[in-house]
Structure formats: C-alpha cells, structure tokens
Amino acid sequence: MPIRTVAVLGAGQMGAGIAQVAAASGYDVVMRDVEERFLASGFSKIERSLQRSVEKGALDTASARLIRDRIQGTLDLAAAAKVDLVIEAVPEDPVLKKSVLQEIDGSAAPHTVFASNTSSIGIGELASVTRRPDRFVGMHFFNPVPVMKLVEVVRGKSTSEETMRLALEVCARMGKTAVEVHDFPGFVSNRVLMPMINEAILALQDGVATREAIDTVMRLGANHPMGPLELADFIGLDTCQNIMEVLQEGFHSEKYAPAPLLRRMVSQGKLGKKAGHGFYDYP
C-alpha cells in the first residue's frame, strides 16, 4: 500500500525534524510523545525552523502554516498506530525502543511499516519484538533533519524487498539521498564517526592538545566543517556514549570502549549543547 500517513514516535530534536520534513513532503503526520511539555517543545522547534525558512525566502508564510497544520500531536500511542508508516525516534536506548515498538505493534494495522531512526542499534534486534520483521526497516536521518540530505536505509535480515522499496520512495519524496546499508552495529556513519570522536576525547584526556587545538586540526587539516569535540557536543555526549557502548557490545571489542572522560562528563550531566555545557559552554 502507498504511504499516505506517518507517525513519528518522539518529539525531540530528531523526531521534530522528521515530522517537519514528512509534513513538508505532503504526508499527514502524527507526532507522539509521553508528556505535553515534550510535544510543546517539539512543536516549538518545528515552528522556529519554519520561521527561519520564511525569513530566508525558502518558504512563504502560507506554506509554512500548511506544513505546521499537517502535524498533530498526541500522547496516545494507539492513536499514533493508525498510520501507514511509523518512524520511531525515541532516545538511543534499546530497552526503551523495544518497549515502545512492542506496544505500538499491538495496535498497528497489518500493513503498517515500521522504521527506526536508530543510529546504531541492530534493526533485526528491534524488529524481533514485533510481529512484522519483514515490514521493519532502518531509516537513520541526520541532524538537523530539515537540512541534512542523507538517510541510511538499513536492511535487516528479514526486511522485505517491498519494505525497502517503500522506504526508498519515502526518502525520495522527502528530497533525501538514501544510501542502503546492511545491519551491522553503527551501520556506516557511526561505525566510522564515533570512534573518531572517542579518539579525540582520549587525546584531550591525555593532554595531547587543548579542545580548541584538536578541533582546529580536524577542521583545517581534514576539512571537516566541525571539530570532533564540538560535534560531540552537538550530537549529545550521552548519545555518543550510548553508541560507543552499542559498538563495544556488538563487536565484542574493547577498542570501542567509551573514553573515561566521556563517561565522567555524562555522569556529571555535561551532555553538550542541549544541556548548556559539554566540551564547550553554550548560552
């Protein structure tokens, strides 16, 4: 069946961005979270993003309003299940993701396709708690979703060809470049990116250079748009730690162990930009 309606589970930075892009592509969207304050924060992010597009001349006011009006918020997981495509975008915690997916699976129609925005957790592992492993696929968007063009479309062991086709069609309608990858811990992006970030944290921990020097070396020497420590702050240090733990467990290798400094900062609540403090301070 064609995809006409989309539910996004989670109204955080990623969920709100996915909901905005889906609505801008003409889908009717349900954005679900567990508290009204999280939904309000998600809608605030969407409205600020749309307003910036209006100010830049990329959208007119009427189009921005139409996009916003295509998104409805709910706290009811069963209500969110009444769609053609469910995109899970809750925090990168396998226990939480499995719990939410298992619960919504009981309410969703047989034809509904499930996608996870996980950045590292196995698609087969997540699909295993549902009754639809053939209709389960990874759709890993990148932050900020309205700007970043890439989606890693992850084929699980049981993902059907029809499900892959639908996921690729959704990405194309959203104006994204879809790259198909197979189901390994961290996929491609985070298997390459996160160990680099972790190594930069180890370099800072060992006193190799200052945070500014490490970031400048990688910006100017490797032509990265953002240094690895600044990028870690942008991603969220708790998310970085979670992904490294998934890689460590998935590959059974200590080379993926999160840096002690990363663990210490997460335990202190220094989670990066979203918390106001990380490797750098944010107003």
Image (cartoon, rainbow, N blue to C red):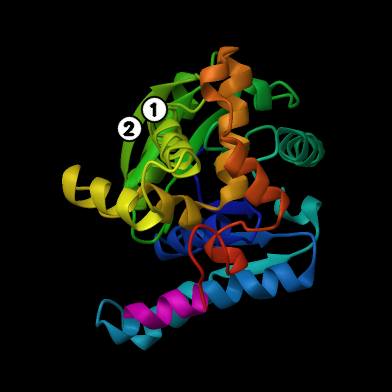
Left or right, residue 11 beside residue 278:
right
In the picture shown, does residue 224 fall above or below 125? below
Residue at the spot of label 1:
188
| Residue at 82 percent of width and 39 percent of height | 103
Residue 238 painted magenta: no
**Quarter of the rendering containing residue 11:** bottom right
Q: Looking at the image, which is closer to me, 239 or 140?
A: 239
SS at circle 1: loop
Q: Which mark is residue 179?
A: 2
Residue located 53% across and 60% down the image = 19
Q: Nearer the viewer, residue 75 or 117?
A: 117
**Tag shown at residue 258:** none
Q: Which residues are magenta?
A: 46-53
Q: Earlier in the sequence, mark 1 or mark 2?
A: 2
Proximity of marks 1 and 2: CB atoms separated by less than 8 Å = yes
Rendering quarter of residue 248 = top right
- The spot of residue 120 in percent (x, y) is 54, 31
Q: Main secondary structure of the magenta part?
A: helix
Query: x, y percentage for residue 172?
Result: 32, 45
Instruction: Count numbered badges in the picture.
Output: 2
Q: Is residue 39 above or below residue 272?
A: below
Residue 270 against residue 190 in the figure, above or below: below
Foreground pick, 169 / 276: 276
Q: Residue at x 67, y 27 (%)?
A: 126
Amino acid on which disc 2 is placed = Val
* Mark 2 element type: strand
Q: Is residue 242 above or below residue 146?
A: above
